[in-house]
Image (spheres, rainbow, N blue to C red):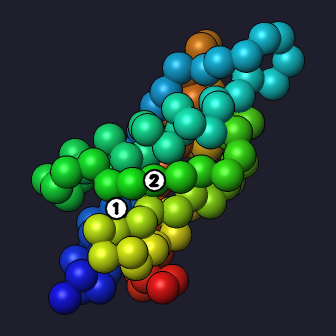
Amino acid sequence: MRTRTLHAAGSVLTTVAAGALLTGCSGTPTLDSDTLADTVAQKLAEATGRPEPDVTCPEDLAGEVGTKTRCTLTAADGSTIGVTVTVTSVEGTQINFDIKADDKPTS
């Protein structure tokens, strides 16, 4: 049953976009992995109308258009689903990105 919930969430999330303020100094702006995970969880909750999921991101997100990273959503039953984050634009001190959950859980 939980698998269906994750699958349905994946199709809803294909159009979720998010923006987050940058951290870091001069050069290529970055968004630290913890802030990225928190932002992804918030946007997923908003898109699905469900509580914020447990999301982890293994690396910081570089503020360059086209940059991608993979995060992992872990459901209450322990199953996981991959989430791709893609930078769409950088505006001043904000990185804008799209979020897309995989169609099927990974475990």
Name the residue rendered at 32%, 41% in the picture: 42
Q: Quadrant of the rendered structure where residue 63 is?
A: top right
Q: Quadrant of the N terminus?
A: bottom left
> What's the residue type where badge 2 is placed?
Val
**Residue 15 visible at all:** no
Name the residue rendered at 30%, 76% in the picture: 77
Q: In this rendering, is residue 34 above or below 57?
A: above
Q: Is 36 positioned to the left or the right of 17 in the image?
A: right
Q: In this rendering, is residue 100 above or below 16?
A: below
Q: Quadrant of the rendered structure where residue 8 is?
A: bottom left
Q: In this rendering, is residue 37 above or below 99?
A: above
> What's the residue type where badge 1 is placed?
Leu
**Residue 27 horizontal/vertical position (percent):** 85, 18
Mark 1 or 2, nearer chain start: 1
Query: Which is more toward the observer, 42 or 26?
Result: 42
Q: How far apart are marks 1 and 2 (CA)?
A: 14 Å
Q: Is 92 positioned to the left or the right of 37 in the image?
A: right
Name the residue rendered at 44%, 63% in the picture: 73
**Residue 16 horizontal/vertical position (percent):** 36, 51
Question: Could you say which disc has been placed on residue 13 in the image?
Answer: 1
In terms of secondary structure, where does tag 2 sit? strand
Q: Is 52 positioned to the left or the right of 33 in the image?
A: left
Q: In this rendering, is residue 20 above or below 67?
A: above
**Residue 14 horizontal/vertical position (percent):** 38, 63
Question: Could you say which disc has been placed on residue 55 in the image?
Answer: 2
In terms of secondary structure, where does tag 1 sit? helix
Name the residue rendered at 46%, 31% in the picture: 19
